[in-house]
């Protein structure tokens, strides 16, 4: 039996569907959650492979200590030998605690299904995504956190049962005074297409061309760290070593030099397109496609070409 923890505080996102699909490829799946999603929404996880969902309405999805106890109780109740998270902020705070509590080996940031014939090993990104590594786990219970966009969610089943569950989460240890929910139609960490820009756009008043292109593509918007630090864009759009690490199918970067700190957050992208006026910009070395040109000319022309292409379909 495999136990999957999902964050359902703001509904069932792509990350939840993806991690359940991943787990189903390894065995029977039970999902445990502490979020506020409705039973009907949670039941849809059955379409991706879950046999049932256990939900504790009393635990708080922002308290790592409570969640650690909740997941440990869930694993014990179903006899799970493998526990899987989506590699998000919750996984980064809960999975290591759970690893210590259960004396379980942890594979953090998996990018493939584990190999189970003989030794239990799994492929991961290392050195901020600059290389790959293989992690071997010898413990009886194993914990995996799956990097987003590793595989596509596969809806092949039907809705499953949802059961109330006492996870013995204990007392709340954190007081949340304010919650700021990122705005935008597509969550950045779940986006398959991302349009990003940096200081080459010269000011926040020029961001309209980035948003227009993103709307045409159905993409999320992002930015480099300096842009968020000076307040041109909100911090939840910052990608890089100190921001969000993303792995979209397509990442378009306009006016970003491509410092190593930025690359650490985006070099897992399937395709990288760089637009820059500087032929020596380091980003060109990491790009699959490079456009040596001014973003103020390239972005509008690209957007118009895409609109014409979509209209002709």
Image (cartoon, rainbow, N blue to C red):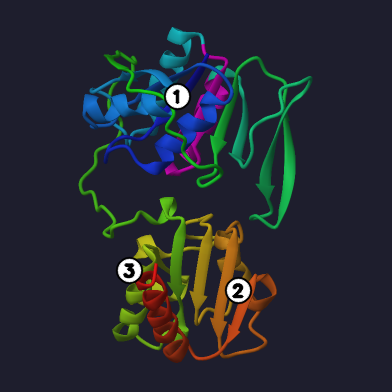
| Label of residue 227 in the image | none
> What crowding class fits label 1: few (fewer than 14 Cα within 10 Å), some (14-19), or many (20 or more)?
many
Residue 165: x and y in percent read: 30, 14
Q: Residue furthest front?
A: 312
Instruction: Give the secondary structure at mark 2.
Output: loop
> Tag 2 or tag 1, which sits nearer the N-term?
1
Residue 90 makes an appearance in the image: no
- Locate residue 197: give its quadrant: bottom left
Where 187 sits versus 196, above or below?
A: above
Q: Which residue is mark 1?
A: 49
**Residue, x 35% and y 86% (percent of image)?**
203
Going from the N terminus, do you reach mark 3 or mark 1 first? Answer: 1
Mark 3 or mark 2: whose residue is earlier in sequence: 3
Name the side, left or right, on which 149 lies relative to 142: left
Q: Residue at x 56, y 90 (%)?
A: 277
Q: Which picture quadrant has residue 258?
A: bottom right
Residue nearer the viewer, 193 or 118? 193
Q: Which residues are magenta?
A: 80-101
* Structural crowding at the residue carrying mark 3, measured as other residues with C-alpha within 10 Å and reported as few (<14), some (14–19) or many (≥20): some
Check whether the beta carbons of the residues at disc 3 and disc 1 lie within 8 A of each other: no
Tell whether 83 sits left or right of 162.
right
Residue located at (33% from left, 14% from top): 168
**Secondary element type, mark 1:** loop
Residue 15 is situated, as x and y percent measured from the top left of the image, at 43, 41
- Disc 1 to disc 2, how far (Cα)? 40 Å
Q: Find residue 259 and name its label.
A: 2
Percent x, y of residue 18? 47, 37
Residue 112: say if magenta. no
Image coords of residue 118 (percent x, y): 79, 19
Give the residue pinned by disc 3.
Answer: 215
Q: Residue at x 42, y 55 (%)?
A: 191
Distance from label 3 to label 2 (Cα)?
27 Å
């Amino acid at each position: 039996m495999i136990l999957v923890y999902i964050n359902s505080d703001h509904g069932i996102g792509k990350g939840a569907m993806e991690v359940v699909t991943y787990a189903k490829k390894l065995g029977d799946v039970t999902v445990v959650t502490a979020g506020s999603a409705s039973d009907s929404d949670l039941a849809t996880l059955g379409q991706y492979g879950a046999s049932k969902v256990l939900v504790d309405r009393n635990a708080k999805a922002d308290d790592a200590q409570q969640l650690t106890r909740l997941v440990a109780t869930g694993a014990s109740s179903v006899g799970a030998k493998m526990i899987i998270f989506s590699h998000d902020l919750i996984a980064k705070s809960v999975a290591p605690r759970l690893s210590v509590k259960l004396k379980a080996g942890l594979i953090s940031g998996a990018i493939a299904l584990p190999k189970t014939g003989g030794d239990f090993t799994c492929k991961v990104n290392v050195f901020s995504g600059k290389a790959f590594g293989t992690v071997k786990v010898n413990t009886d219970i194993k914990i995996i956190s799956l990097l987003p966009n590793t595989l596509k969610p596969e809806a092949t089943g039907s809705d499953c049962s949802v059961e109330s569950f006492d996870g013995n989460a204990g007392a709340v240890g954190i007081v949340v005074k304010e919650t700021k929910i990122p705005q935008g139609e597509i969550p950045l960490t779940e986006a398959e297409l991302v349009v990003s820009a940096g200081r080459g756009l010269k000011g926040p008043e020029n961001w309209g061309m980035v948003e227009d292109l993103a709307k045409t593509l159905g993409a999320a918007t992002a930015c480099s760290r300096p842009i968020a630090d000076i307040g041109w864009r909100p911090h939840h759009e910052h990608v890089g070593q100190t921001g969000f690490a993303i792995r979209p199918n397509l990442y378009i970067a306009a006016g970003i030099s491509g410092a190593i700190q930025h690359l650490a957050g985006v070099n897992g992208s399937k395709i990288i397109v760089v637009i820059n006026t500087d032929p020596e910009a380091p980003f060109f070395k990491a790009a699959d496609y490079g456009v040596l040109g001014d973003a103020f000319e390239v972005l509008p022309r690209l957007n118009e070409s895409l609109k014409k292409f979509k209209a002709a379909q």
